[in-house]
Image: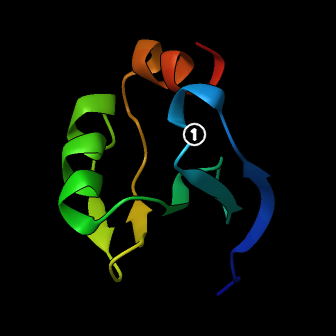
Amino acid sequence: MSSARAEVAIWQARDGDRVYYRFFGEDAPTVWLMDGPPAEDARAFARERGFRSVRVVDDRWAVLGPITDHARLVAQWEG
């Protein structure tokens, strides 16, 4: 079993209170670690942006699953 590792940290002006850490494993980058606002905001944010899943780690950290819709994926990272 291979381990995932953080490849890059991303900050976007439109999400100024969040920092994303992209992880690679066997496949394309599908898991993101997000440092940001409290847990309830992370859940709402994940639903709004199209992330398939969210797991809140503590009051600032959440693991975001992949965005499976290509248009929403492009809007999140290139929009």
The structure residue drawn at horizontal position 29% and vertical position 55%, both measured from the top left corner, is 42
Left or right of residue 35, residue 57 in this image: left
Q: Nearer the viewer, residue 16 or 27?
A: 16
The structure residue drawn at horizontal position 29% and vertical position 73%, both measured from the top left corner, is 56
Residue 77: horizontal and vertical position, in percent? 61, 27
Residue 33: horizontal and vertical position, in percent? 54, 64
Kind of residue indicated by mark 1: Gly
Which type of secondary structure does the marked residue at label 1 adopt? Answer: loop
The structure residue drawn at horizontal position 33% and vertical position 78%, both measured from the top left corner, is 59
Quarter of image, res 26: bottom right
Quadrant of the frame with the C terminus: top right
Residue named by callout 1: 16
Q: Nearer the viewer, residue 67 or 40?
A: 40
The structure residue drawn at horizontal position 24% and vertical position 53%, both measured from the top left corner, is 41
Location of residue 1 with respect to 12 vertically, above or below: below
Left or right of residue 31, residue 40 in this image: left
Quarter of image, res 25: bottom right
Location of residue 47 with respect to 58 vertically, above or below: above
Residue 57: horizontal and vertical position, in percent? 35, 81
Q: Nearer the viewer, residue 22 or 26?
A: 22
Q: Which residue is situated farthest in the bottom direction here? A: 1
Left or right of residue 47, residue 10 in this image: right
Location of residue 14 with respect to 21 vertically, above or below: above
